[in-house]
Image (cartoon, rainbow, N blue to C red):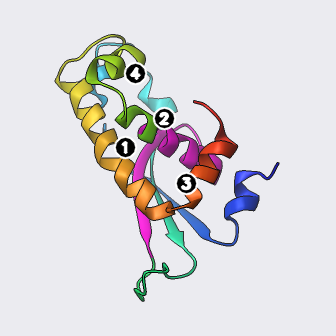
């Protein structure tokens, strides 16, 4: 079975930039825990198509997300996070809170859930038909 890099090597480019660390929107769920922010860095990850989309547009499609990771994210790691966001967008707030926010459905958990709901259609539009292949390679989260 092909790896993600082999599948996307000809079509997608990943550009990663480290950002100055400030807690991202929705991450206040972690604020009451003893979370070591010194071990996590904030990254802007931009995925770009190497060729213009088949819609006839001359502009290249770009999908940019910000993620937290201790080391520079790889294409596989970025796609795993995007797949988790797409899957989380299909959940109810209650299920989302149970899995990702330690059972809470407060404002911070709701903000994170809403971010996933906004990200999912962008991801699916960016990858188009390839998204089903990507999810099959990644496997269940």
- Residue 114 located left or right of residue 83: left
Q: Is residue 141 above or below residue 76?
A: above
Given this view, does label 2 or label 4 mark the residue nearer the observer?
A: 4
Q: Which residue is more in the foreground, 74 or 115?
A: 115
The residue that disc 2 covers is 40
User: What are the residue bounds of the magenta stretch?
Assistant: 61-85
Q: Are marks 1 and 2 in contact (CB under 8 Å)?
A: yes
Residue at coordinates 17% horizontally, 24% vertically from top-left?
A: 107
Q: Position of residue 45 (x, y in %)?
A: 48, 56
Q: Nearer the viewer, mark 4 or mark 1?
A: 4
Which is more N-terminal, label 3 or label 2? Answer: 2
Mark 1 or mark 2: name the one nearer the start of the chain.
1
Is disc 4 placed on a helix, strand or loop?
Answer: helix
- Can you tell which mark lies on residue 131? 3
Distance, label 1 to label 2, CA atoms, is 9 Å
Assess whether mark 4 and mark 2 are in contact (beta carbons under 8 angstroms). Answer: no
User: Whole-Å distance between the Cαs marked 2 and 3?
Assistant: 28 Å
Residue 21 is marked as 1
């Amino acid at each position: 079975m092909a790896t993600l890099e082999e599948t996307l090597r000809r079509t997608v480019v990943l550009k990663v930039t480290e950002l100055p660390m400030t807690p991202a929107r929705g991450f206040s769920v972690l604020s009451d825990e003893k979370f070591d922010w010194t071990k996590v860095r904030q990254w802007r990850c931009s995925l770009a198509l190497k060729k213009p989309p088949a819609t006839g547009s001359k502009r290249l499609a770009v999908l940019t997300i910000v993620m937290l990771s201790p080391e520079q994210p790889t294409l596989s790691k970025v796609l795993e996070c995007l797949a988790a966001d797409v899957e989380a967008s299909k959940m109810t707030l209650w299920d989302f809170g149970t899995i990702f926010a330690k059972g809470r459905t407060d404002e911070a958990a709701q903000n994170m859930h809403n971010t996933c709901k906004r990200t999912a259609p962008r991801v699916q539009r960016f990858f188009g038909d390839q998204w089903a292949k990507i999810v099959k390679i990644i496997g269940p989260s």
